[in-house]
Image: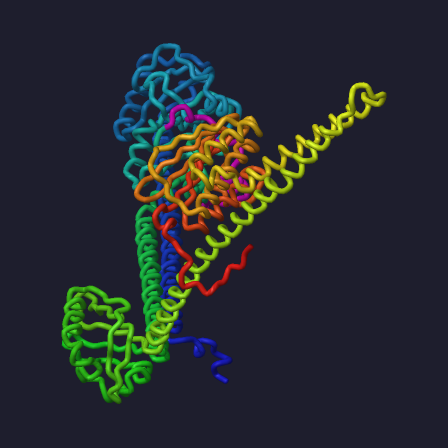
């Protein structure tokens, strides 16, 4: 019941271990990943908190700077009367000197003031502690125009401007000076240098390589930025954006992650609106820089996780390999135990260490009876030297395969076995024992001996019958030749004589010239005589072809010379006969077979070679007759199996069969387009001395 609910219980030992290993690996990697996620969140939150702290610090610093400048202006304004600005006239020299001395004293107490202009209603600077050029006008400045248009008691902060006297970037904080009637009398301002009052301070903050600090007005114009980007100073950063939207929504401060509109670098921005001025501070910190150490931790975690996974894979492969080895060992053990062959092992001293059931069947000993004993219990005494030699081969690392030897069973019976020995090595390669596989071949050896004897007897019988068949073939050839001679003699002596007598009789019947029917009868008699002459020539030719007298009277070479003349007369084939002059003793049957073979081959040349000549060479070498027929005709593919065909003719196939059956050889050399050479080889003396002896066959002939 538990195994159905928990499949883990049904798994094998190796599978259970692997599942446990990979579960632990998965939990460990999950822990590492969760730690990374938590660490990143902590880093992000720390950057957000740091950015907001810096935004508040920048807000406080800017507010203090503007407040200090405003107090300075208010202190100076207390010493300026309406009469100083009435009528928009210039100050007297003494009065100007007095006001500028006051301004210088204030400027000395507050470093960072680039300029402190006092302008009348027309925008003409009438006093400036650093000595403004005469007639210098600031009427075109936006902050002057704002103060000129609208009566107000609060200061105006300008956009970032480049000082006309100091030639430095600054922000002007200016206040309106009204006459007694409330009309615009002029303005006084202080130019706060960006470096002296802002960027030098921002440089002390730990902003990182890509951090940025800026002050922006209500129209999102850039008043101050660190790092400085002069071409952007005094210009709107963006017509709209997430920070501006948050400010318009009424948020006094906030944090968000956006790319900068100035350099497009993504930062975590903290913004904060100033309480007393229409300006907000923005501090952006690069998350990438803050994540450098986190990324190192992440890479180390990734490497650690990869190593853990690789370790898990290695463990998996190792366990699987151990499982396969264990299964193979079990399988091999089953195979060894169930094998019909005798399989055993022994150490290098010959002590048996294992013994399968097949060994018990082959040798009759049980495992308990032989394990721990020497292999001599199954080795015959006369095979002791053989065993010593085998053991030396094993010690040198050599195997022995299928050695046929003899062993002794428990009951003393000797058995033939096929023995295979293989060395067994330790992990380090040192040979410590060997295995022996023995197969009982006693029955197969008995059958092998019986088959050998049967094959030997059969071979002798085949040789005997072959000799008898060859003798019989020779006798049949001789009988055939005698029959040919008899037929030829009958044709010559009987039918030839009859045809001759008929011709004589017809000649005697010739009608005298005086007879009236002389012409018709004379013509008919002449025609009959012509037909009889043709019949007589045909009978003579047939008689010669059946059994040419020259072959029996003069031998093979003269018969072949006569055949050459016949081939030229009958077929137009020129045949050149070449003889070495050596004696060529042949019995009549062999001579007749060779003669007819040459005739068949020459007829083949006429029919198939498409050539008008051929050469016949006859020679004797090492007691054998060598006869070759050569032509320069179209040839054929001699590699193809020989059989009767239109290409090689029935005669060549018949010749091959006769020559081989007669104890000779035939060799054919021919390729398409390159002529043909046929070589016939027959033994001389052996063939001439053969007699039909010890034959149980009787030849019946005429």
Q: In the rendered view, would you say 83 is above or below 200?
A: above
- What residue span does the magenta drawing correspond to? 229-256
**Residue 251 vs residue 301: left or right?**
right
Q: In the orientation shown, which residue stands out farthest toward the top?
A: 134
The location of residue 332, given as percent across then percent down, is 34, 74
Residue at 48% of width from left, 28% of height from top? 575
**Residue 165 vs residue 349: left or right?**
right
Q: Is residue 245 magenta?
A: yes
**Observer-nearest of 247 and 334:** 334
Residue at 53% of width from left, 40% of height from top? 245
Q: In the orientation shown, which residue stands out farthest toward the right?
A: 516
Residue at 29% of width from left, 72% of height from top? 418
**Observer-nearest of 611 and 198:** 611
**Observer-nearest of 206 and 377:** 377
The location of residue 518, given as percent across then percent down, is 81, 22
**Residue 242 vs residue 627: left or right?**
right
The location of residue 314, given as percent across then percent down, is 32, 62
Residue 17, quarter of the rendered image: bottom left
The location of residue 325, given as percent across then percent down, is 33, 70
**Observer-nearest of 520 and 401:** 520
Q: Is residue 579 magenta?
A: no
- The image shows a total of numbered marks equal to 0
Residue 136, quarter of the rendered image: top left
Residue at 49% of width from left, 44% of height from top? 655
């Amino acid at each position: 019941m538990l195994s159905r609910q928990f499949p883990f219980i049904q798994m094998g030992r190796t599978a259970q271990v692997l599942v446990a290993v990979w579960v632990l690996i998965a939990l460990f990697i999950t822990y590492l990943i969760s730690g990374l996620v938590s660490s990143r969140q902590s880093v992000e939150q720390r950057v957000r908190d740091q950015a907001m702290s810096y935004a508040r610090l920048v807000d406080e610093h800017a507010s203090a700077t503007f407040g200090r400048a405003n107090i300075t202006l208010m202190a100076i304004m207390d010493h300026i009367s309406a009469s100083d600005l009435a009528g928009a006239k210039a100050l007297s020299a003494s009065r100007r000197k007095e006001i500028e001395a006051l301004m210088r004293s204030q400027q000395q107490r507050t470093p960072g003031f680039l300029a402190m202009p006092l302008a009348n209603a027309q925008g003409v600077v009438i006093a400036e502690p650093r000595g403004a050029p005469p007639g210098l006008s600031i009427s075109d400045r936006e902050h002057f125009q704002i103060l000129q248009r609208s009566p107000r008691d609060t200061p105006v902060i300008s956009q970032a401007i480049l000082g006309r006297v100091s030639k430095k970037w600054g922000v002007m904080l200016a206040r309106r000076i009204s006459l007694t009637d409330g009309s615009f009398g002029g303005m006084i301002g202080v130019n706060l240098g960006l470096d002296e009052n802002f960027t030098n301070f921002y440089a002390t903050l730990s902003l990182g390589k890509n951090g940025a600090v800026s002050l922006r007005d209500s129209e999102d114009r850039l008043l101050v930025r660190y790092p400085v980007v002069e071409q952007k100073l005094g210009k709107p950063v963006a017509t709209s954006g997430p920070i501006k939207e948050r400010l318009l929504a009424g948020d006094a401060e906030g944090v968000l992650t956006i790319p900068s509109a100035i350099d497009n670098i993504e930062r975590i921005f903290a913004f904060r609106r100033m309480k007393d001025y229409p300006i907000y501070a923005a501090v952006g910190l690069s998350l990438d820089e803050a994540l450098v150490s986190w990324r190192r931790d992440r890479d180390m975690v990734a490497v650690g996780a990869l190593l853990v996974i690789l370790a898990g894979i290695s463990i998996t492969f190792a366990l699987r390999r151990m499982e396969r080895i264990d299964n193979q060992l079990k399988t091999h053990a089953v195979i060894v135990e169930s094998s019909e062959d005798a399989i055993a092992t022994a150490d290098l001293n010959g002590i048996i260490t294992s013994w399968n059931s097949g060994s018990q069947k082959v040798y009759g000993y049980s495992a308990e009876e032989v394990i721990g004993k020497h292999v001599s219990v199954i080795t015959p005494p006369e095979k002791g030297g053989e065993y010593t030699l085998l053991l030396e081969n094993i010690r040198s690392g050599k195997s022995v395969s299928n050695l046929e030897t003899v062993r002794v069973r428990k009951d003393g019976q000797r058995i033939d076995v096929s023995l295979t020995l293989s060395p067994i090595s330790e992990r380090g390669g040192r040979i410590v024992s060997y295995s022996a596989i023995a197969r009982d071949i006693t029955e197969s050896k008995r059958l092998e001996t019986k088959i050998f004897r049967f094959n030997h007897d059969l071979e002798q019988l085949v040789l005997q019958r072959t000799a008898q068949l060859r003798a019989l073939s020779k006798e049949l050839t001789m009988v055939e030749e005698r029959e040919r001679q008899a037929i030829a003699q009958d044709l010559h002596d009987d039918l030839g004589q009859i045809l001759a007598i008929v011709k004589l009789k017809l000649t005697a019947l010739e009608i005298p010239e005086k007879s009236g029917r002389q012409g018709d009868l004379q013509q008919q008699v002449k025609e009959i005589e012509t037909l009889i002459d043709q019949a007589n020539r045909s009978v003579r030719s047939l008689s010669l072809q059946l059994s040419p007298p020259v072959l029996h009277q003069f031998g093979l070479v003269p018969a072949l010379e006569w055949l050459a003349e016949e081939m030229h007369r009958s077929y137009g084939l020129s045949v050149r006969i070449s003889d070495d002059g050596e004696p060529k003793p042949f019995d009549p049957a062999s001579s007749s077979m060779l003669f007819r073979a040459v005739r068949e081959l020459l007829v083949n040349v006429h029919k198939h070679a498409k050539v008008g000549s051929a050469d016949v060479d006859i020679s004797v070498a090492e007691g054998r007759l060598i006869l070759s027929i050569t032509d320069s005709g179209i040839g054929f593919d001699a590699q193809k199996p020989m059989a009767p065909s239109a290409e090689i003719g029935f005669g060549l196939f018949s010749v091959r069969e006769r020559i081989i059956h007669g104890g000779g050889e035939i060799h054919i050399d021919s390729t398409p387009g390159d002529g043909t050479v046929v070589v016939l080889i027959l033994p001389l003396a052996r063939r001439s001395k053969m007699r039909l002896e010890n034959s149980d066959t009787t030849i019946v002939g005429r």
